[in-house]
Image: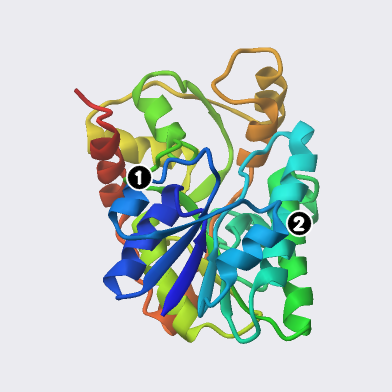
């Protein structure tokens, strides 16, 4: 079986490639010319040059593939980058789905951002909740919702696509430090302020292990949340768990969201106002569907935190 992976040089992609190789699949990776593919080559991955803007390169990469895992995308909450988010996350997804051959199973790796935040910390969201009006306008979530509409259109045309909605990824292997930075910033003493809100902190290794199973068992057009019940934690709870695992306790002051957002525009926080605006929601999720359909059983949050710390050598 030949499987194409976009985003193979990233955090989740790196773990997924290893999962697929262990399953005996021939893996092909779409990779930009600027990407470091040495580790992929050492693993025996076939490199197909190109990116999401190049329809010809995408068609060549997808040629002869039985399955496609589309992970590549842009993660940013900066409202000034809406154009890039649309081009990469939405139009890039459209091009991938147009490039695949008939009969190819596609796993589109979206995000829980497309599902939207839950009503409260103790009321986690499910795959079928209506997107909350209060979160409309968040740039990253908007781009992922729009990409899922592209998927729905493709499914209506007969393309076989299933959707994965991972939680907020931590764990070893975050090559670009896109997801694990709050943990590192807390331990370094750079993150001394927080606000209301929560995330579903999920080990990338668990999501990577679940994706091939989703490809095997998922139902066309449906979402499956791949988050972590134990990882559903408010910012204060998350920092407390880091402190318990690491033995490093930092004083963190919590501000109400309006004050936190306003202050982030004038005070040199480690995060921008747009990031605080996104963080001040309850991004927590119910994983019952994945548990039932895939046998999904993610590791505990403390283990994921410990592995992240060890991987990045965050403690002396």
Q: Quadrant of the N terminus?
A: bottom left
Task: Give the x, y percent position of residue 49.
Answer: 54, 52
Q: Is residue 3 above or below residue 32?
A: below
Residue 248 left/right relative to 49: left
SS at badge 1: helix
Quarter holding the C terminus is top left
Q: Outermost residue toward the top?
A: 267
Question: x, y (%) of residue 145?
Answer: 73, 60
Any part of residue 19 in sight: yes
The percent coordinates of residue 199 (x first, y second) are 52, 48
Say what secondary structure mark 2 lies in: helix
Coordinates of residue 136 in the picture (x, y in percent): 79, 51
Nearest to the eye among marks 1 and 2: give it: 1
Foreground of the two, 158 or 199: 158
Q: Earlier in the sequence, mark 1 or mark 2?
A: 1
Residue at position x 74%, y 44% in the image: 139
Residue 202 occupies which quadrant of the picture?
Answer: bottom left
Residue at 64% from the left image edge and 30% from the top image edge: 256
Instruction: Sort mark 1 into few (<14), some (14-19) or many (20+) by Cα contacts within 10 Å.
Output: few
- Bin the neighbour count of mark 2 within 10 Å (Cα to Cα): few under 14, some 14-19, many 20 and up: some
139 relative to 27, above or below:
above
Distance between the alpha carbons at the discs numbered 1 and 2: 28 Å
Residue at 69 percent across and 61 percent down: it is 56
Residue at the far left: name it.
316
Q: Which mark is residue 91?
A: 2
Query: Which is more toward the observer, 84 or 182?
Result: 84
- In the rendered structure, the answer to whether residue 6 lies left or right of residue 101 reads left
Instruction: Name the residue that disc number 1 marks.
Output: 38
> Can you see residue 108?
no
Looking at the rendering, which quadrant does residue 147 occupy?
bottom right
């Amino acid at each position: 079986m030949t499987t194409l992976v976009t985003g193979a040089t990233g955090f989740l992609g790196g773990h997924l490639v290893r999962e697929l190789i262990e399953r005996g699949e021939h893996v092909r990776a779409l990779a930009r010319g600027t990407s470091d593919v040495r580790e992929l080559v050492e693993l025996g991955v076939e490199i197909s040059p190109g990116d999401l803007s190049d329809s010809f390169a995408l068609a060549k990469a997808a040629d002869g593939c039985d399955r496609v895992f589309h992970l590549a995308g842009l993660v940013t909450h900066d409202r000034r980058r809406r154009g890039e988010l649309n081009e990469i996350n939405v139009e890039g997804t459209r091009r991938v789905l147009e490039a695949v051959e008939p009969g190819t199973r596609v796993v589109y790796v979206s995000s829980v951002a497309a599902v939207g935040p839950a009503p409260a910390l103790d009321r986690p969201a499910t795959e079928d909740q209506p997107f909350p009006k209060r979160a409309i306008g968040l740039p990253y979530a908007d781009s992922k919702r729009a990409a899922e509409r592209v998927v729905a259109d493709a499914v209506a045309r007969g393309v076989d696509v299933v959707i994965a909605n991972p939680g907020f990824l931590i764990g070893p292997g975050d090559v670009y430090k896109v997801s694990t930075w709050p943990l590192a910033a807390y331990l370094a003493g750079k993150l001394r302020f927080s606000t209301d809100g929560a995330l579903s902190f999920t080990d990338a290794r668990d999501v990577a292990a679940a994706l091939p199973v989703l490809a095997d068992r998922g139902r066309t057009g449906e979402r499956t949340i791949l988050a972590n019940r134990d990882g559903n934690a408010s910012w204060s709870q998350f920092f407390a768990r880091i402190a318990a695992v690491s033995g490093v306790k930092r004083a963190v002051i919590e501000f109400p969201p309006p004050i936190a957002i306003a202050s982030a525009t004038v005070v040199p926080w480690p995060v921008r106002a747009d990031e605080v605006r996104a963080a001040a929601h309850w991004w927590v999720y119910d994983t019952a569907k994945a548990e039932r359909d895939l046998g999904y059983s993610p590791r505990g949050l403390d283990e994921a935190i410990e592995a992240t710390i060890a991987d990045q050598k965050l403690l002396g």
